[in-house]
Amino acid sequence: MIVDCAMYRDGRRTEGADDFSDALALCRAGGDSFVWIGLHEPTEDEFDLVTQEFGLHPLAVEDALKAHQRPKLEVYEDSLFVVLKPVSYEPKGDTVTSGEVMVFVGDSFVVTVRHGEESPLKGVRQRLESDPEMLRHGPTAVLYAIADDTVDHYLEVATELGTDLDELEAEVFSPQLGGSRNTASRIYGFKRQVQEFRRATVPLAMPLGRLSGTGVKGAAVPFVDEKAQPFFRDVNDHLLRVNESVEALDRLVSDILSAHLAQMSVRQNDDMRKISAWAAMAAVPTMIAGIYGMNFDHMPELHWLWGYPVVIALMVVLEILLFRLFKRRGWL
């Protein structure tokens, strides 16, 4: 569905033609105007009209309709196609959810296609409309604002993930909670969420590198004002910080999982030592009782007056010696 459609002239929203092609013609004739159309999960029929009027490339249109794309930047003859993946984080469920925003930038137009409920663009549009000086830069300003808003949310999510990981680390190394049966599954689930976050942030480095002029070729990107490169460079710097945080989170959660598994292994070894120690202590009186329970005729101790108390005393002494030995070695 079309969420919003507006024409901007000299940094301010203006009333324009109802027809897309007429509005685009007016903007191109004026020179300082552009059209911004926002869509949310459009159907193929809904997107056909936009595709025809703005001459969008069929491959980019297919990506925009099907979604499930990696962050990327593609240059076509009549437009620039950028894919961003905004994310949100639910601390209670330790869940990272990603959406997608596709941005078509061309001569005097911007078309945004959003999938998912993460990072609605209404706030971005309102902030831009309250800053005419920024909007005067045309479609480039829209692309920059969307990228900046997306990466700012990355920073917030990275901070929240770091906080929750600190709590998980404290739980793992807590004497009371370190052996919880659900701890390993929680750690593994948290690692999957970090990987989901990573799939949104890491691939974005290359597109932002090209937009900021720091890519491999360092050449300007069509339909993007070269004067905007410092602004995209600032967004790229923030993204580098996010990616560093993501790498640190991934390493730390792997280390925590390894530490937890090592703890569980040590604890199981301790349990086995205790079981073995108690079994050894139980074996001594069992062996002695077994010998005297074989009912042989020629066993002098059976007819000795002090035989029974001596055997019982021997059992007690041996048990005490074994207990002290195992206790000294930390088996009990």
Image (cartoon, rainbow, N blue to C red):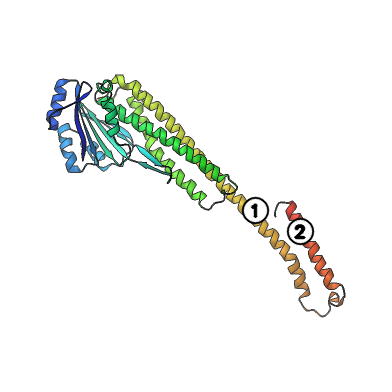
Question: Is residue 218 visible from the viewing direction of this image?
Answer: no
Q: Earlier in the sequence, mark 2 or mark 1?
A: 1
Helix, strand or loop status at disc 1: helix
Using the image, tell me which numbered label, if any, was put on residue 127.
none
**Three-letter amino acid code at disc 1?**
Asp
**Residue 149, quarter of the rendered image:** top left
Query: Where 265 falls versus 151 (above or below)?
Result: below
Helix, strand or loop status at disc 2: helix
The answer to whether 75 appears left or right of 292 in the picture is: left
In the rendered image, the quadrant that contains the N terminus is top left
Mark 1 closeness class: few <14, some 14–19, many ≥20 residues within 10 Å: some
> Residue 104: x percent and y percent?
24, 32
Q: Residue at x 33, y 26 (%)?
A: 210
**Three-letter amino acid code at disc 2?**
Leu
Q: Which residue is mark 2?
A: 322
Using the image, tell me which numbered label, if any, was put on residue 270.
1
